[in-house]
RNA sequence: GGACCCGUGGUGUAGCGGCCCAACAUGCCAGCCUGUCACGCUGGAGAUCGCCGGUUCGAAUCCGGUCGGGUCCGCCA
C-alpha cells in the first residue's frame, strides 16, 4: 500500500485512491483545490500533482477536524487523516479517477495558509494574462496544464537519454564559460574577475567542444546542453534554451541519419504513443526539392497542396510561351517561372477572401496573384480565363492538379519569389482550412543544403548552417574561388554551388534539428573558413584549438543538434516554447519573477574592472537616460 | 532598429466623448445549510479605467509620449 511518495505526511498521493482501497486508513496532504461548506458537512477537494481526491468532514463524527476545515481556504496546504470509503450510491464523480471514493477525514491540520492567489490555480481552462503567469510562475506551474507539460518534457528527456545510453553514447558535460566565437549569433559575455579586461562567452552550442571530443576518441557523445544566444526573442526562441547535442565518429551521413531517425521513432513512440507517425521511414527531400515543391526548407508535410510548375501547360508545340496571357508569357520568356497551388474546396471563395489572398501575396513580395476557380461542373472561371481560352484554362488547371471545387492560385515571377510566396500562401491556407491534423507527427529529412550564401555586405561566403559542415564528396572540386585564391571570395565563385553534407529534421513544419558530417581535415577546413572570409591569422585566433586538434588525428565525424524546447512544445501542441519551460523570459529578456536583469552592486562592477558608460533602468528601477548600455573597460 | 495588437475591482471581460466616481461573471468577506463536486441561498466589501501630458464645457472613451506584455519583420539555427 505505501507508495514511493509515502511519508510522515501521507500514505498516498491525491491521485491514487480507488474503490479497492475502501475501508483502509489513509492520510493525504496537498493544496485545497476547492472547499464546499455544506454546514454540518464540509467537502475539500485536495490536490497535488498526481490528482484530486475528495475529503469529507462530518461535524458530528469529527468536530475538531470540522472546526479546522471551516477555517480552510483555497490553496491552503493541509494534511488529512481518516478512512477511505466508497462514496454513497449516486454521489460518485465520474470525472475524477478517484471519484468512486472519498477520504472521511477525522484529523485535519493546516500546514500552511495561503493568500488569495492572483489567478485561478484550480481552473485549467482559465485565460490568464501572461505577465501574471510569469510573475507568479510557481502558481502557474501548480496549475494542471503547466504541470502536465513539464512532466511530459521530463519524460521526453528521459526517453532521449535512454535511447542514447542504449546505443553506446557517452553523456559528457561541456563548460558554459568558454571562448567568444564571432560566428553566428551574438554572444553573452561574462567578464572575468581574475583577469580584468577579459571575458568568457556563454556557448551558443557545444559545437567545437563536441568535435574536440571526437578527436579525443569519445566516438559517440551526447548532451542535454543549455545554449545561449543574445538575439531578439520570438515565440520559438529564448535567450537560453536546451539542445540535444550529439556527435558520432567514423560515420557518413547515412549512419548519423539512421541512428537519429531510429532514436526519434523510439522517443516518439515511447513518449507520445497515441500520436501516429505520418511516414516511416521519414521522407527525405533535398533542399532544392523542398524549395521547389513547398517553397520552404521546413515544409509541413501533414497536408498536400504542393507547388506545381505550370511551364509545360503554357508553352506551345514550338516550346515557346503561348498561353495568351501576357503576364505569364512575358515572365516565362524572361526566364521566370509560373507556379501554382490548388486550394481544395475554395472555388467558391468570395471576392473578399480572394482579395485577401492577393493582398497576402503582394505583401510577401509577389507582383500579383492570378486565380482560376474549377467549379463543381468542371467549368473553369476567373478573370484571366478569357485570355487563356476555355481549352487553355482547362489545360492549366489540370496541370495544376486541381479537381472540381478547387481554387488555383498562380504566381508568375522569379523562381525564388514564386516559391516563397506560394509556400507561405500554402501554409496560410492550410492553417485556415485546418488541413493539418494536429495529432499527427510528420517528421522529414531535408538534405543537401547549399554550403554557403553570399554575404554581400562583408564580401564573403557565409555558411548556411554551420561553418564546420563538410561538403558532399562530389562537390568538393567546387570549393574554389574564381580568382583561385581562397582568401579572395567573390559571388561568382564555384563555391556558391557546393552542397553540404547537411541534414535537417523537420516536424510538422518546425525545424527540430540540424546537423552535418563535419570537415575533419585541417586543409579542407582552412579552405572553407577562408571562403567564409577568415584570414589565416583570424581563423587561428578563433578556431585554433579545433585546427590544432585536427593535426593530431581527427576521425571522420558528424552529428546533429535538436531543439528540446521545440520538441516538447510540438509534443504538447503548443506554439510557444515558453509553455514548456519552467521559468522563461519575456520578449524583452526579462525574468518577471526574479526581476532580472538588474543593476549590479557597485562593488561587483569594481571587482570586474567595469563601469557603465550608459544605461537603461533595470526592471525594478526607474527608466534611465536611454543611452546604449555599453561598457567601458577600466583594466 | 521597425510594424501591429493589448493594458478597466483579485481575475476574465463589457463600456469607446456626457446616460459611468463605471457594468457583468467569477473570486474575496460574513451568515445560513449533513451529500456536495464550477454546491446553493442571503448580504457585503472591492477599480478614478497602466503612467504622464494634451484636445474638449466635459475623457475609461480622442490625440501624443512613456512603461509593461504579446505577435511579426530585421536579427537568429
Image (cartoon, coloured by chain):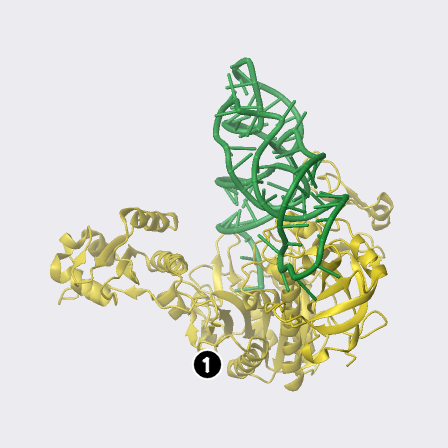
Q: In which quarter of the image is residue A420?
A: bottom left
Task: Bin the neighbour count of mark 1 within 10 Å (Cα to Cα): few under 14, some 14-19, many 20 and up.
Answer: few
Q: Decide which of A346, A329 is in the foreground and name it.
A: A346
Describe residue A571's horizontal placement relative to residue B10 as left or right.
left
The location of residue A370, given as percent across then percent down, is 26, 53
Describe residue A143's horizontal placement relative to residue B25 as left or right.
right
- Which SS class for mark 1? loop
Q: Quadrant of residue A415?
A: bottom left
Q: Decide which of A128, A454 is in the foreground and name it.
A: A128
Find chain B in the image and tell me its colour: green
Question: Is residue A420 at least partly visible in the picture?
Answer: yes
| Number of marks | 1
The location of residue A590, given as percent across then percent down, is 68, 49
Image height of B31 relative to A90, above or below:
above
Residue at image coords 17%, 63%: A378
Describe residue A345's horizontal placement relative to residue B31 as left or right.
left
Check disc 1 and report the residue beneath it. Answer: A280
Find chain A in the image and tell me its colour: yellow
The location of residue A346, given as percent across then percent down, is 29, 58
Q: Mark 1 lies on which chain?
A: A
Q: Decide which of B56, A208 is in the foreground and name it.
A: B56
The location of residue B75, given as percent across then percent down, is 55, 53
Image height of A453 relative to A382, above or below:
below
Query: Where, quadrant-wise, is the N terminus of chain A in this rendering?
Result: bottom right
Q: Decide which of A549, A154 is in the foreground and name it.
A: A154
Question: Is residue A183 at least partly visible in the picture?
Answer: no
Amino acid at each position: 500500500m505505501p507508495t514511493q511518495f509515502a511519508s510522515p505526511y501521507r500514505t498516498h498521493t491525491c491521485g491514487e485512491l480507488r474503490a479497492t482501497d475502501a475501508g483502509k486508513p489513509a492520510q493525504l496532504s496537498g493544496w485545497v483545490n476547492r472547499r464546499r461548506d455544506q454546514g454540518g458537512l464540509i467537502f475539500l477537494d485536495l490536490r497535488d500533482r498526481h490528482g484530486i481526491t475528495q475529503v469529507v468532514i462530518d461535524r458530528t463524527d469529527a468536530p475538531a477536524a470540522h472546526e479546522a476545515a471551516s477555517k480552510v481556504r483555497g490553496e491552503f496546504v493541509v494534511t488529512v487523516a481518516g478512512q477511505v470509503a466508497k462514496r454513497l450510491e449516486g454521489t460518485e464523480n465520474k470525472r475524477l479517477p478517484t471519484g468512486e471514493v472519498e477520504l472521511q477525514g477525522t484529523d485535519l491540520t493546516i500546514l500552511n495558509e495561503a493568500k488569495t492567489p492572483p489567478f485561478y490555480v484550480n481552473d485549467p481552462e482559465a485565460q490568464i494574462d501572461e505577465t501574471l503567469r510569469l510573475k507568479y510562475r510557481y502558481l502557474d506551474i501548480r496549475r494542471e496544464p503547466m504541470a502536465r507539460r513539464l512532466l511530459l518534457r521530463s519524460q521526453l528527456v528521459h526517453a532521449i537519454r535512454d535511447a542514447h545510453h542504449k546505443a553506446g553514447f557517452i553523456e559528457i558535460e561541456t563548460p558554459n564559460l568558454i571562448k567568444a566565437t564571432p560566428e553566428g549569433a551574438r554572444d553573452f559575455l561574462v567578464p572575468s574577475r581574475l583577469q580584468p579586461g577579459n571575458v568568457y562567452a556563454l556557448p551558443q552550442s557545444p559545437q567545437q567542444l563536441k568535435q574536440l571530443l571526437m578527436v579525443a576518441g569519445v566516438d559517440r557523445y551526447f548532451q542535454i546542453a543549455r545554449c545561449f544566444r543574445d538575439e531578439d526573442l520570438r515565440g520559438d526562441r529564448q535567450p537560453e534554451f536546451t539542445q540535444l547535442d550529439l556527435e558520432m565518429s567514423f560515420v557518413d551521413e547515412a549512419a548519423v541519419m539512421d541512428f537519429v531517425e531510429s532514436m526519434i521513432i523510439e522517443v516518439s513512440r515511447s513518449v507520445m504513443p497515441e500520436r501516429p507517425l505520418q511516414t516511416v521511414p521519414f521522407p527525405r527531400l533535398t533542399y532544392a526539392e523542398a524549395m521547389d515543391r513547398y517553397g520552404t526548407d521546413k515544409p509541413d508535410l501533414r497536408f498536400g497542396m504542393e507547388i506545381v510548375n505550370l511551364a509545360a501547360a503554357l508553352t506551345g508545340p514550338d516550346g515557346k510561351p503561348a498561353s495568351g496571357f501576357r503576364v505569364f508569357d512575358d515572365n516565362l520568356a524572361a526566364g521566370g517561372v509560373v507556379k501554382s497551388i490548388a486550394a481544395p474546396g475554395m472555388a467558391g471563395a468570395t471576392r473578399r477572401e480572394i482579395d485577401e489572398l492577393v493582398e497576402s501575396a503582394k505583401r510577401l513580395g509577389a507582383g500579383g496573384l492570378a486565380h482560376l476557380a474549377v467549379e463543381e461542373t468542371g467549368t473553369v472561371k476567373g478573370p484571366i480565363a478569357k485570355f487563356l481560352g476555355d481549352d487553355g484554362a482547362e489545360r492549366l488547371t489540370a496541370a495544376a492538379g486541381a479537381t472540381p471545387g478547387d481554387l488555383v492560385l498562380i504566381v508568375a515571377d522569379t523562381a525564388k519569389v514564386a516559391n516563397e510566396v506560394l509556400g507561405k500562401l500554402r501554409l496560410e491556407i492550410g492553417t485556415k482550412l485546418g488541413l493539418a491534423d494536429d495529432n499527427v507527427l510528420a517528421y522529414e529529412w531535408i538534405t543537401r543544403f547549399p554550403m554557403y550564401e553570399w554575404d554581400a555586405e562583408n564580401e564573403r561566403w557565409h555558411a548556411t548552417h554551420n561553418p564546420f559542415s563538410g561538403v558532399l564528396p562530389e562537390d568538393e572540386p567546387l570549393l574554389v574561388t574564381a580568382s583561385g585564391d581562397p582568401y579572395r571570395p567573390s559571388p561568382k565563385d564555384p563555391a556558391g554551388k557546393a552542397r553540404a553534407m547537411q541534414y535537417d529534421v523537420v516536424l510538422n513544419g518546425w525545424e527540430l534539428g540540424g546537423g552535418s558530417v563535419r570537415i575533419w581535415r585541417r586543409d579542407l577546413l582552412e579552405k572553407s573558413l577562408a571562403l567564409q572570409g577568415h584570414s589565416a591569422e583570424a581563423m587561428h585566433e578563433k578556431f585554433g584549438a579545433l585546427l590544432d586538434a585536427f593535426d593530431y588525428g581527427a576521425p571522420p565525424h558528424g552529428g546533429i543538434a535538436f531543439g528540446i524546447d521545440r520538441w516538447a512544445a510540438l509534443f504538447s501542441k503548443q506554439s510557444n516554447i515558453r509553455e514548456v519551460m519552467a521559468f522563461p523570459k519575456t520578449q524583452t529578456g526579462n525574468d518577471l519573477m526574479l526581476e532580472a536583469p538588474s543593476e549590479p552592486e557597485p562593488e561587483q562592477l569594481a571587482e570586474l574592472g567595469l563601469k557603465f558608460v550608459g544605461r537603461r533602468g533595470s526592471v525594478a528601477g526607474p527608466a534611465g537616460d536611454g543611452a546604449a548600455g555599453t561598457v567601458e573597460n577600466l583594466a
